[in-house]
Amino acid sequence: MSDPTSDDPPVSIRIRGMSGLQPTPRRQEMRRLAAAMRTTIEHLVSTTATTEDLASAADQLEAVAAAVAALPRGATYQGFAEAANAGAAMREHLDHVGADADDPDGSSGAGATGAAPPDSLQLITEHAGRDAEFFAFFDHSPLIGLANPLSPPVTLAQDGDRVRGTVTFGSAYEGPPGCVHGGFVAAVFDELLGATQSMSGTQGMTAHLGIDYRRPTPLHVPLELEGWLDRRDGRKIWARGSLRAAGESTVLAEAEALFIAFDPGRFRELLEARDPESPVE
């Protein structure tokens, strides 16, 4: 059971989930394939190769693309790869498990309310070990997913009441010359603050994201992210964050985001609409 008198901040659910993923052989190969594609993208957008070299590389890449296209397709994970959405799916799953464990016949009605049981953080910890594949959607995130070649990727970790992250943007993310496109900076803040808001003890969707771009954000430079909870008012959760070059004090960008805590019934409707052939249990 979690201790309500503890001074320790609640755990960020998506960070705990990502760290709980097991390095299965299949996952390692997915991540290796994504890393190779990420390297290909980086060199493709910054190459000075000749026409002949490009033609040869295109022939080889088309053969690889055809081989990958011939592989079986279909979702291999539950939930949503985007952090602010995935947290609610995870919470609902863990609450359901907790309700079943505490009330097998459903007589108390706890499972129907969607409210988190008191020991939900304990359930998260346990599931990170014994049901880690439920968290597999994080590996497909376009920002933190090691199995997604579109991700930079961003790494996130909880440090007390803060979420800290690192990221290095390659050439594919260029906006102004030598600098990161502002849209990618905003996307990273959305991911960072989505992880941060889960420390409020609930999950929410982004309602507003405001970015203050203080300085150009350089490409190919290790960057440091920091996120923290600002305040909460009912279903409204505010989080703030900052971005700096690693080891530097100058703030490159700052962000504030408003999240609205999920209505469990509405979220269930979204899940069922996403996959009507497989209704949520």
Image: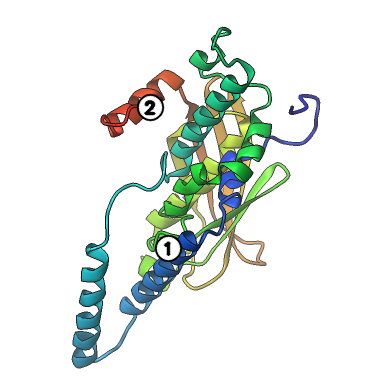
Q: Residue at x 57, y 36 (%)?
A: 197
- Along the line of sight, the residue nearer the viewer: 250 or 220: 220
The location of residue 266, given as percent across then percent down, is 38, 21
Report whether residue 177 is seen: no
Task: Examine the rendered structure and indicate whether residue 31 appears above or below residue 163.
Answer: below
Q: Secondary structure at mark 1?
A: helix
Task: Tell me the distance, in whole angstroms, between the alpha carbons under discs 2 and 1.
Answer: 27 Å
Q: Secondary structure at mark 2?
A: loop
Give above or below for 199 relative to 21. above
Q: Position of residue 158 (x, y in %)?
A: 66, 48
Q: Position of residue 281 (x, y in %)?
A: 41, 25
Quadrant containing the N terminus is: top right
- Pointer 1 residue: 30
Residue at (51% x, 67% y) in the render: 168
- Three-letter amino acid code at the position of disc 2: Val
Residue beneath disc 2? 280
